[in-house]
């Protein structure tokens, strides 16, 4: 990957009263032009080589890719299935940070999916060879041919890191990906800790709490950890989960959300 330092400025701490999904930064280009970019405007961020890593990993100390993979490995410790036998679907793969972490352990197959075309281009630019295949698609609008193709990979693992909630991945998209995994396969993901709070009644929060308590998912390891820092230096905590799929999520469950 081509390393490049960008001129990034965060807003003043004492005037910043933004939620996590509203946080932004200012990017100044070589000619002095300033652009205000939201942290969740990934399409724009991915077009600048190295900007995503500089923001989230260098400045804000994100550790979720490494942590969620570690949680998955811990959850699988007593399983007869070896880590290098996993056929993984990486949902919301972004520019390939999670894929690169998974690849360190020699997994069998790795396919990335992201609705963002700039993400797909960033993977080819920054991490060529990490994925066996990568698709920029909306999984709720797959053609029969696309679905058959993905089913042909016979996934026995789904990972989704720093992509759930905030409207980045809708409930139905997660459900479509989940249902592509073989019954008994592994599912690893992370979510902001507040999504498990009973006071949160947003659609994704209700869905994930329902799924965790349902017959379709069995939790093997769950861990609270520091996902990254906020722009004012405060820790943002997430839960990482390693689970096994016990059955497909039915349409009735989604319709009840």
Image (cartoon, rainbow, N blue to C red):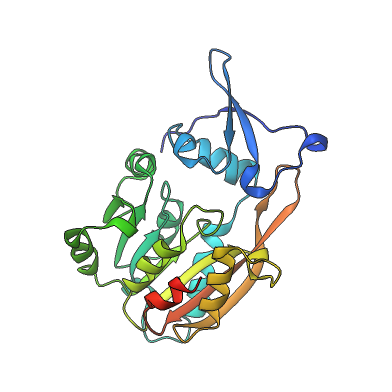
**239 or 144: which is nearer to us?**
144
Percent coordinates x, y for residue 194 in the rendering:
68, 64
Residue farthest toward the top in the current orientation of the protein: 31
Residue 48 pos. (x, y %): 46, 31
Vertically, is 54 above or below 220? above
Closest to the observer: 122 or 40? Answer: 40
Residue 106 appearing in the image: no
- Residue 223 can be seen in this image: yes
Residue 12 lies left or right of residue 109; in this view the side is right
Q: Is 37 situated left or right of 177 in this image?
A: right
- The N terminus appears in which quarter of the rendering? top left
Residue at 51 percent of width and 77 percent of height? 211
Residue extending farthest left: 145
Name the foreground residue: 199 vs 127: 199
Residue most extreme to the front = 256
Tell me: 113 left or right of 42. Answer: left
How many circles with numbers are drawn on the protein? 0
Image x and y of residue 113, in percent: 34, 55
- The relative height of residue 205 versus residue 248 in the rendered view (above or below) is above
Q: Residue at x 71, y 69 (%)?
A: 199
Q: Nearer the viewer, residue 16 or 157?
A: 16
Relative to 20, 168 lies left or right: left
Residue 36 falls in image quadrant: top right
- Residue displayed at 38% across by 71% down: 178
Q: Is residue 133 above or below residue 128?
A: below
Image x and y of residue 61, in percent = 64, 49
């Amino acid at each position: 990957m081509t390393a490049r330092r960008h001129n990034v400025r965060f807003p003043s701490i004492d005037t910043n009263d933004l939620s996590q999904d509203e946080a932004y930064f200012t990017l100044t280009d070589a000619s002095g032009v300033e652009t205000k970019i939201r942290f969740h405007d990934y399409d724009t961020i991915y077009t600048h080589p190295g900007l995503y890593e500089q923001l989230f990993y260098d400045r804000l100390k994100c550790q979720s890719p490494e942590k969620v993979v570690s949680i998955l490995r811990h959850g699988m410790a007593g399983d007869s299935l070896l880590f290098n036998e996993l056929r993984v679907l990486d949902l919301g793969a972004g520019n390939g940070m999670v894929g690169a972490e998974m690849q360190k352990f020699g997994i069998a197959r790795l396919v990335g999916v992201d609705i963002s075309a700039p993400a797909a281009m960033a993977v080819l630019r920054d991490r060529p060879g990490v994925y066996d295949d990568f698709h920029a698609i909306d999984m709720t609008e797959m053609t029969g041919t696309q679905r058959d193709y993905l089913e042909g990979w016979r996934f026995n693992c789904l990972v989704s890191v720093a992509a759930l909630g905030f409207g980045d991945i809708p409930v139905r998209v997660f459900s479509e990906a989940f249902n592509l995994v073989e019954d008994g396969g592994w599912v690893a993901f992370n979510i902001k800790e507040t999504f498990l709070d009973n006071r949160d009644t947003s659609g994704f929060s209700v869905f994930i709490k329902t799924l965790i308590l349902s017959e379709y998912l069995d939790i093997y390891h769950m861990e609270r950890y520091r996902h990254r820092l906020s722009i004012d230096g405060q820790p943002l905590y997430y839960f990482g989960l390693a689970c096994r799929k016990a059955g497909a999520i039915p349409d009735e469950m989604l319709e009840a959300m």
